[in-house]
Image (cartoon, rainbow, N blue to C red):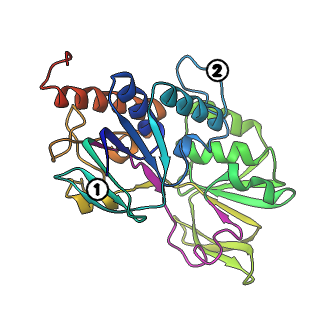
């Protein structure tokens, strides 16, 4: 069994920040990630609001995070899944049988894209239904797609798609977007259609691929079918909280981990940071919370003193 001072469960912006700060404090630090390091940051087409940084591709900023954490000694490991976690002993067991023990655990498991929950969504996932324009836009060159959602993430997806696909429309349940003004101004300049006050009731297909959607106007309840080739869903996120729940961490009514001002959970020696704590899902929020969590983890391990 390998032993560490800190283990971050998750390798998004928060987890990589734990790797950076933990290793710089001289702590043996491990960052575990089962999908893609950087999380949503890694697949963002362009990040324009990270302080001190010119607009940069998400994957490039992710690589900088990884390189900086590794430079100071953090270990970054890919994994398939965690089979169990002992919150008292701070022991993580992977499905491969590998075990890691820590003095402190920091949950940075983030969140995942929310699903519509309509007929056709599961059936046509990967066959016209997507949650990632950066990943899948090129499959829809010269084709017609919609983006479902009205916030920042939907706006970013739309602005990426409009550069590549044939025709883009936004489906939003309200009569105006909730995105930042800078995104709205860019959308207004582009050739983008809108289905206001509308929701997707069903995703249609021919058994092999998406052929359209059935929309409903939330005010008039009138329905219409729209022929198209792709549906990009961007309606928010749900927390990756399964492991936290199994470990006995206290969750709020929306499933996010409850923390105090130190980012401490209800279990001593276990902290949380980033999207998994709820609140504003911003890169700067995640890195700030991870910094706070790691600093307090250091103090926890050293009796409240900065001097070892």
Residues in magenta?
105-130
Residue farthest left in this picture? 303
Q: Is residue 11 left or right of residue 251?
A: right
Q: Residue at x 54, y 25 (%)?
A: 50
Q: Is residue 184 above or below residue 125?
A: above
Q: Which mark is residue 244?
A: 1
For marks 1 and 2, the one nearer the N-term is 2
Which of the 4 image quarters holds residue 208?
A: bottom right
Circle 1: element type: helix
The one nearer the camera, 146 or 52, is: 52
Q: Position of residue 294 (x, y in %)?
A: 30, 30
Residue in front for this viewpoint, 211 or 69? 69
Disc number at residue 54? 2
Q: CA distance from mark 1 to mark 2?
A: 36 Å
Q: Residue furthest right?
A: 142
Residue 30 percent coordinates (x, y): 39, 40
Residue 225 appears anywhere in the view: no
Percent position (x, y) of residue 210? 72, 73
Which quadrant of the figure has residue 228? bottom right
Magenta stretch, main secondary structure class? loop
């Amino acid at each position: 069994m390998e032993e560490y001072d800190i283990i971050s469960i998750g390798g998004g912006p928060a987890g990589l920040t734990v790797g950076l700060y933990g290793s710089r404090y001289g702590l043996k630090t491990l960052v575990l990630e089962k999908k893609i390091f950087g999380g949503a940051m890694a697949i963002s087409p362009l990040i324009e609001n990270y302080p001190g940084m010119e607009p940069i591709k998400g994957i490039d900023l992710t690589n900088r995070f990884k390189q900086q954490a590794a430079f100071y000694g953090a270990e970054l490991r890919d994994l398939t899944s965690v089979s169990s976690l002992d919150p008292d002993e701070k022991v993580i067991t992977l499905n491969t049988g590998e075990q890691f023990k820590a003095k402190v655990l920091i949950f940075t498991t983030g969140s995942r894209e929310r699903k519509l929950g309509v007929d056709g969504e599961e059936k046509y996932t990967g066959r016209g239904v997507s949650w990632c324009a950066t990943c899948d836009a090129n499959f829809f060159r010269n084709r017609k797609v919609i983006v479902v959602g009205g916030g920042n993430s939907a706006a970013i997806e739309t602005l990426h798609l409009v550069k590549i696909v044939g025709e883009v429309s936004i489906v939003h349940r309200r009569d105006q977007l909730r995105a930042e003004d800078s995104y709205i101004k860019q959308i207004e300049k582009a050739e983008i259609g809108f289905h206001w006050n509308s929701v997707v009731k069903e995703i249609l297909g021919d058994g092999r691929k998406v052929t359209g959607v059935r929309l409903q106007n939330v005010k008039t309840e009138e329905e219409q079918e729209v022929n198209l080739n792709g549906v990009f869903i961007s309606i928010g996120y749900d927390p990756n909280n399964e492991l936290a729940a199994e470990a006995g961490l206290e969750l709020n009514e929306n499933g996010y981990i409850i923390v105090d001002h130190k980012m401490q959970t209800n279990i001593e020696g276990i902290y949380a940071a980033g999207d998994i704590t709820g609140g504003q899902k911003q890169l700067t929020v995640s890195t700030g919370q991870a910094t706070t969590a790691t600093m307090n983890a250091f103090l926890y391990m050293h009796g409240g003193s900065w001097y070892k």
